[in-house]
Every structure is written in structure tokens, then in C-alpha cells.
Image: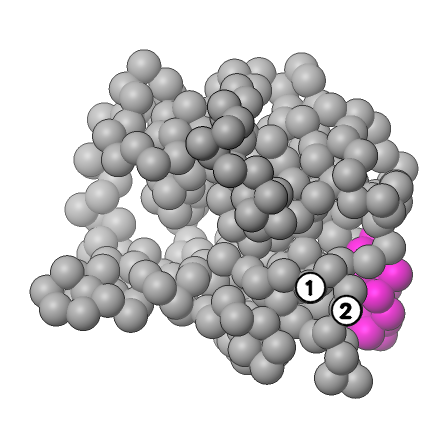
Amino acid sequence: MFYWGVKAILVPLLRLFRPWAEGTDFVPRSGPAIIASNHLSFSDHFFAPLPLPRKVVFLAKSEYFTGRGLKGLFSRAFFRGLGQIPVDRSGGKAGERALATGLRVLAGGNLLGIYPEGTRTPDGRLFRGKTGVARLALEARVPVIPCAMIGGFEFQPPGEIRPRLAIRPGVRYGPPLDFSRYYGLETDRIVLRAVTDEIIYEIMKLSGQEYVDEYAQRHKSRKSPRHEEPKAAVRAGDGSESGGQADSAGAGSADGGAAGKPGGANGAGGVSVPARDGTTPRGAASAD
């Protein structure tokens, strides 16, 4: 009830920004499913679930829920009202707990929202996905609905609180992805990478973003904003530049540095989960 109360208050306010939506019919009206989205700005938390008649539960970084005082209390209430669940981004066992949380949400027949890149894009491009989204899809045996936020990077650039009213933020949903051919293989890292790359490729087709075969968090730590100007993202609503092609399984290069198509045989989970044997895959990184 709290979720719908918050949404009832926010919807009239958010409509002042003239948001648009496409493909909402692809989102099932009942039953569990994963919504996998790119992550352009803080405003994604509002505009992604806005046009849907169902509640979407997002895995969110725990920092939103750990503040102190009145501000911390407001933050916790606000994000819980948006249907978000705190996730520890430290990796290791915390990643397994995040995975278990996501599985519980899906077991309850709910829509689970996740950002496979693990964090917001630093420059408007689409970065390599973490394989936690694949593990969730295969273990819960649910479809994945690719989702592309459009124009959010320009609408609210990094570090800016005030949105740019000239930009209309949008969301575009794609047809559900069925990975039933991989059921029972959720511990196979090659399969997890292939599934993740296919999801990222579908997001890329919907968003028109340029793809970078590198984890966004690693790119952020390597590139200081003081030394590099942010690159412009694809214009809102313009899906003409997809940044390359990929095969149906999303397979591609594994060098971690080539742009153009999702690929690679190694990587960490979308919620930073280690392998079943307790080891951490090479290239593991924390989730957002």
C-alpha cells in the first residue's frame, strides 16, 4: 500500500517532465519476471516503473538506507516507498545474499528490476554487464524483459540535481527473453556470460547506445572526470546508432577493451556473486 501511495503522489509531479514510454505491453501483467535496464541517471528509479500498472522491486545500493538523522529516515522511507531493497555492494558473501534476496522477490511472483551494469554510466555509453542477472534468470526460471532508459543522461547529467526541462525522458521495453534452453546450467560461467551479453545486446538495440566492453565501475576508477570530458550520449529517442552487432548469443571479444558489441567469457555477477565453489570469478566487481 505504501508503494502505491508514493506512486500516486509522484505520478502527477513526474508527468510535468513529459515522460514517454514504449513497449509496456511486453511487461507481463502477472507472474515473476526480471526487468533488466541500462542506468543513465538517478531519475531512472522514477521513470522506469512509472508507466507500469505493477509494482517493480529494484535492488538498490545499501547506502540509500544507512543515513542517519532526519535525512536518513526520509531516504529510507522514500526508497522503500519506491519498492527498492537495499543490497550490500561489497561482493563475496554479500553478493550471495543479494542473489538470495532477488530470488525471494521472484519466488513471490513479483517483478524484479536490476541494472546489469552494476552502476550508473559515467558518460552515457552502455557498459559490460555483470552475470548476476543471468544467474537470477536461470535459477528462478523467469523471463527477462530488456528495458532502455532514453535521454536520462542528458535530462540529469552526473553531479547535477536540477533536471534539464528541455529533455523528455523516456523508457522503452522490449520483448521478453526466454533462456529456458540454459536451465540447469546456472553454474556454468560461459553460459552466464552468454546470457548476460544477450541481455545487454537487446538493451543496446533498444537504447541506441554505444557499447563499451569494460565494467562501468572499473572505467570510473580508471578515468578521472577532472582529466576527461564526459562524452555525449545518444540523443533522446534516437536509436539509429547501436554501436555494433552481436550474434544471437551475445558472444564477442573477451579482451575487455573493445567497443561495439557485448562479449567476453569472464565476468562477475550483476549483483556481484561468486561461483558455487566459493571462489570469486576473475574480474569480479561490486553491484549498485
Name the image colouring. Answer: one colour
Q: What is the x, y in percent for residue 271?
A: 59, 65
Segment colored magenta: 180-194
Residue 77 place in picture, x, y as percent? 22, 64
Direction left: furthest residue: 70
Element under disc 1? loop
Residue 284 got which mark? 1
- In this picture, residue 5 sits left or right of residue 79: left
| Measured Cα–Cα span from mark 1 to mark 2 | 6 Å
Disc 2 residue type (three-letter): Pro
Q: Quadrant of residue 278?
A: bottom right
Residue at horizontal 64 percent and vertical 24 percent from the top: 208
Q: Is residue 193 magenta?
A: yes
Q: Main secondary structure of the magenta part?
A: helix
Q: Which residue is mark 2?
A: 281
Amino acid of disc 1: Ala
Residue furthest front in the image? 227
Circles 1 and 2: CB distance less than 8 Å? yes
Q: Is residue 166 magenta?
A: no
Pointer 1 local density, CA inside 10 Å: few below 14, some 14–19, many at least 20: many
Out of 20 and 44, give the one closest to the viewer: 44
Counting labels gives 2
Q: Which quadrant is the N terminus positioned in?
A: bottom left
